[in-house]
Image: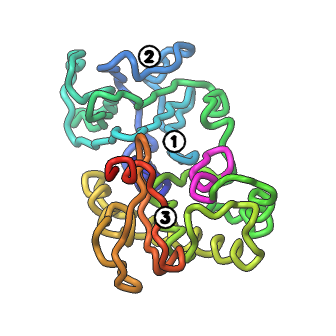
């Protein structure tokens, strides 16, 4: 799933290529991706893109009229193309979900695609981004200058949930998903099973620093990359996420995994859990 760093890089790519240009056509190829109907997508046509912003994992194409909000979900992606056909795409079973073509003879623009059969990519055309429920409930952005250690500590205080889940909760902190929560906790030398409200002041400060450093480093690596290279760039920068069975780059211990119904987490026992493997009920059932 694209998370804060990748969405930030996509926002920069769109800002550099689309701001100041007029939208010629917006064609949904999969009707299910459109989550709003007023204003219609056609209200974007003839409008000028004035800014591209990120809200958590949402992309926001602001125009001199409505906003086009995009959430790529788990398997969605944005593919910039310097030349798009004028004819609208044919609805079908392929990965194409929406096409936006800018005005001009070259026909530049982008395609939104989604792999797999579990369709969750979402598109909204709204007058104000706060009309989108997922944006209205977002917590603070972890890279905002206004997001202080004191505010972070306040968000965790008294919370009786595992810190892994708290970091992923978009209503608590915006933009962090499964992959970067693994990376942040590894950098902070912290078990993903720790209860957020039990962290000491020193642990909260360590986690806050690890969060900022991990995300800033990922953003710096992502910026300037072409959209097609962002997924590979993300994978190459991971130290534990997606690296089950490989040696931890810090201590050399084997990276382990805990599996859940629709996701998994990766961690280093030596760096994060005092050398003790975490219970994996799913694996335990298989071994019985």
Q: Which residue is mark 1?
A: 58
Residue 216 picture location, percent across and down: 51, 69
Q: Element at badge 1?
A: strand
Q: Which residues are magenta?
A: 163-172
Q: Element at badge 2?
A: helix
Residue 261 picture location, percent across and down: 42, 41
Residue 15 picture location, percent across and down: 44, 49
Res 149 seen here: yes
Could you tell which of marks 2 and 1 lies nearer the N-terminus?
2
- 215 vs 199, left or right, is left
Camera-nearest residue between 171 and 61: 171
Classify 179 as above or below 211. Answer: above
Magenta: main secondary structure: helix
Camera-nearest residue between 15 and 179: 179
Residue appearing at x 75%, y 65% in the figure: 198
Residue appearing at x 65%, y 61% in the figure: 144
Q: Which residue is mark 2?
A: 42
User: Dots 1 and 3: beta carbons under 8 Å?
Assistant: no
Residue appearing at x 53%, y 18% in the figure: 36
User: Dots 2 and 1: beta carbons under 8 Å?
Assistant: no
Q: Nearer the viewer, mark 1 or mark 3?
A: 3
Q: Nearer the viewer, mark 3 or mark 2?
A: 3
- 169 vs 79, left or right, is right
- The CA distance from mark 3 to mark 2 is 52 Å
Say how many tags the image has.
3
Q: Which residue is mark 3?
A: 278
Classify 43 as above or below 141. Answer: above
Q: Element at badge 3?
A: loop
- The CA distance from mark 2 to mark 1 is 21 Å
In this view, the residue farthest toward the front is 288
């Amino acid at each position: 799933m694209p998370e804060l760093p990748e969405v930030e890089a996509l926002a920069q790519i769109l800002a550099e290529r689309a701001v100041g240009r007029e939208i010629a056509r917006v064609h949904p190829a999969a009707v299910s991706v459109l989550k709003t109907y007023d204003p219609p997508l056609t209200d974007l046509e003839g409008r000028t893109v004035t800014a591209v912003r990120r809200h958590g994992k949402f992309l926001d194409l602001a125009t001199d009229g409505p906003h086009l909000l995009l959430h790529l979900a788990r398997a969605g992606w944005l593919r910039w193309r310097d030349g798009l056909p004028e004819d609208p795409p044919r609805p079908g079973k392929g990965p194409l979900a929406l096409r936006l073509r800018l005005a001009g003879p070259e026909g530049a623009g982008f395609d939104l695609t989604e792999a797999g059969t579990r369709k969750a990519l979402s598109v909204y055309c709204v007058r104000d981004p706060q009309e989108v429920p997922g944006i209205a409930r977002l917590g603070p952005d972890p890279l905002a200058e206004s997001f202080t250690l004191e505010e972070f500590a306040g968000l965790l205080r008294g919370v009786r949930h595992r810190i892994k889940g708290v970091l992923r909760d978009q209503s608590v902190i915006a933009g962090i998903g499964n992959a970067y929560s693994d990376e942040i906790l590894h950098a902070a030398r912290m078990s993903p099973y720790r209860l957020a409200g039990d962290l000491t002041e020193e642990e909260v400060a360590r986690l806050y620093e690890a969060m900022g450093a991990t995300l800033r480093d990922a953003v710096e690596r992502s910026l300037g990359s072409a959209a097609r290279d962002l997924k590979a760039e993300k994978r190459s920068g991971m130290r534990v996420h997606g690296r089950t069975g490989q040696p931890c780059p810090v201590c050399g211990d084997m990276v382990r995994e805990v599996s859940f119904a629709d996701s998994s987490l990766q961690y280093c026992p030596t760096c994060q859990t005092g050398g003790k493997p975490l219970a994996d009920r799913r694996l335990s059932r298989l071994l019985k």
